[in-house]
Structure formats: C-alpha cells, structure tokens
Amino acid sequence: MTTKTTDRIYIGGFLALLGGMLLLFAIQPKTIFSELENRNLQAVPELNWANIWSQRYAEEAELYVTDHFPFRSEWIAAKSVLEQLRLQKENNGIYLGDDGYLFEKFGEPDYEELGAYADAVKQFAENHPDSQMTFMLAPNAIGLYPQRLPWMADAYPQRVVNEWVGARVGDALTFLDGFAFLQEAASEGDRQLYYRTDHHWTSYGAYLAYRAYAERMGWEPLPEEAFDIRTVTESFLGSYHTKGQFGGAKPDAIQVYEPKNAIGTEMFNADSDETKISLYDDSFLAKKDKYAYFQGGVHALVTIKSELNPADADLDKLLIVKDSYAHSVLPFLANHVKEIHMIDIRYYNGNIGDYMEQNGIDDALLLFNTATFTQERGLLKLKY
C-alpha cells in the first residue's frame, strides 16, 4: 500500500468520523437540564448583531456544542476510569472525600453576578411590602464539611458567600442562613445531613430546615417523635456519583418522615394537569433519580392542599420559590399550611408577583442551596 493511499484512508476515515459526529449532534434529542451535572444546559444561542458584536454568540455556541456533544455521559465515564487508575481524588468537578463523601467543586463566585441575584430577591420583597417573606440559603455539603475534603482540594468558603448574600438583602426580608441551624448537628457528626453521593440534603437535614423556618414563623414544630421515620430505599447513588464515576461508593438510604397523626393531602401538578393524593412517587425508587421520590421530581408549579383542622392550621396559604432542596422540606410544611404553592424558578416563566396577588398569598419562602443560587440566572425573574 502506497503512502498516498494510506493518507487517503486516514483522511477519509477522519472525514467520515467527523461527518458521523455532526449527524449525531444534529439528530439527537436535546435536553434542558442535566441530572448528571445538576445544572441547566446551554440553550441554542440567539443569533443577532448585539450577540455577535459582544462575542456572546461565539461563547454560547461553544458551550452549546460542549453541553450537547454526542455520548457526552459516556466520555465522562471513560475519563473517570482513567483518572481513578492514576489514584486521582477528583474527576469531572467531583472530589472523593473522607468517609465516602463526594463533593462538587465550589469556586469563588462572580460577586457582581451574585449581587444581581441577591438584589432581585430584595426587589421581590420590596415589591410586596405587606407580605411576610423569608429567604433560606442552605449550604452544600462542601460548605459544611470542608474538613472531609481530600488533601490540597480547593474550595471557596460558602459561609462567606452566605454571609455576603445575607448582608446584601439586608432587612428587606428575613434571612435564614443554613449554617445557623445545621452547624451544631454537623459538629456532632452522628447523623447524616447530606447524602454522600448526591447534592441534596437528607430528610434529617430537611427536618432541621423545617424546624428553623417553623420557629421563625412562630409555629410549634413537630418533634421527631411525632413521625414514623421509614427507610424507603438503601440503593441511592446520586448525582455526584453519576458525575464523578468513582467506583466502590456505598449507596445512600432515603428516609421519609410520616406524621403519626396523618393528614390527607392533594397535589396538583400544573405541568401535567394531574392531581395525586400523595406527596411521594414510589415509581422513582426503581429509577436512577431516586430523589425524585419527593413529589415526582422537578415541576414548574405544583399546588398542595392539606386537610387540616382549623385549630391545627398555622397558615392558610404559602408560596415557596425554590430549587430542589425544597422538595424534602415540603412534606413537613404540609402539617402547618392548608395550601402551598411551589414554583421552581428555573422553569416557571410567569410573573411570580402577579401569581401571588391572583391567588391571595401573603407569605412566601424562598429556599435555595448556595451552589445553585450563585449561578441561577432565573433568579432575575424575581425583579418583575
């Protein structure tokens, strides 16, 4: 075989591979949210002169191709295997820490951008001066357990971020810093506040958040003794495990707190126009995303009605504007509130202030985790 023939085979093979990848990229379904990476994927960039001139179009186009590259999950898994063979403690932005904990990298946020998000929260409160509003900012595991990170792992302190955001929103609304109600339990260290393999807090962590909010509202929080605590699965390998692909991880258990004095609930999902009589979806316990057991996962808008006796109800209506940390807190709040409206800021595109007024809601809880809050542009919707 001549050198010229060999070169033609190489060039032809390369062009065929390139053409095949382009075809796959064009025809494969595009998703909005990556469960693997717990973030919104880059949408199709908008082609206009302003974006071209500012180079924003080129930047977003590059991110779009990266986020939707064919077999991206498989490439990530292959990279992880190679990294583990080198005994590396970090892969794809996930650290392998002590006691089997996985942590997602957290760097110093863009404070100009973060200020815009905090200002949007403040503006939302100022737009509704007669409403009682609370903003709860929950740290992630990397913020609460920095001592469990591997040697030389770099992590910007989330405590600094939370304190900065709290100072920025000022007294426009009540600010509940998650460090204040989680730190003592974290120091004791005898119970899990976060899943080892996932980015969410456990049901116990959610219980502590509920208790802090109830006390802030002047309610009498239910003690743990008022619940039957039941383990619904012991095989949960969450988003950090999926993204980091570290072998030998011990699965997490998911628990549910069922009140001994059970109350009837009805949940309406506006996305699917369905009504269910449970706040849990057992079908997800057999799937990868087991945390979606709580309310069946992420929805733009759900409404929950609880059959509470008038004497047992602490509040008629509550609006929760949130990320998915709120999902495991919601069942606790249903023991106090007759009607809860829950909006996911990432997917709801209506005017939230108008929604409050149209539904006669005077109380609101904004609940976000620190990592999401520092990078979620959807928060800017709160300004309007």
Image (cartoon, rainbow, N blue to C red):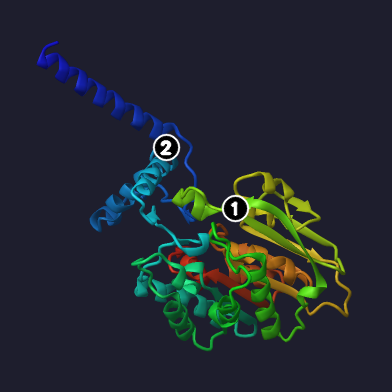
Rendered location of residue 278, percent (x, y): 78, 56
Q: Give the farthest residue toward the top.
A: 1
Identify the secondary structure beneath mark 2. Answer: loop
Instruction: Describe residue 333's horizontal placement relative to residue 190 as left or right.
Output: right
Instruction: Describe residue 60's horizontal placement relative to residue 299 as left or right.
Output: left
Distance Cα–Cα, label 2 vs label 1: 25 Å
Instruction: Describe residue 70's horizontal placement relative to residue 219 as left or right.
Output: left
User: Which residue is labeled 1 in the image?
Assistant: 251
* Marker disc for residue 367: none
- Residues packed near mark 1 inside 10 Å, few (<14), some (14 to 19) or many (20 plus): some
Rendered location of residue 363, percent (x, y): 68, 78
Q: Give the farthest residue toward the bottom.
A: 171
Q: Nearer the viewer, residue 52 or 197?
A: 197
Q: Are marks 2 and 1 in contact (CB under 8 Å)?
A: no
Above or below, 237 against 217 in this view is: above
Which dot, 2 or 1, sits closer to the camera?
1
User: Which residue is labeled 2 in the image?
Assistant: 71
The amino acid sitting under disc 2 is Phe
Picture quarter containing residue 252? bottom right
Residue found 36% across the figure and 54% down from its top? 88
Residue 297 visible in the picture: no
Picture quarter containing residue 344? bottom right
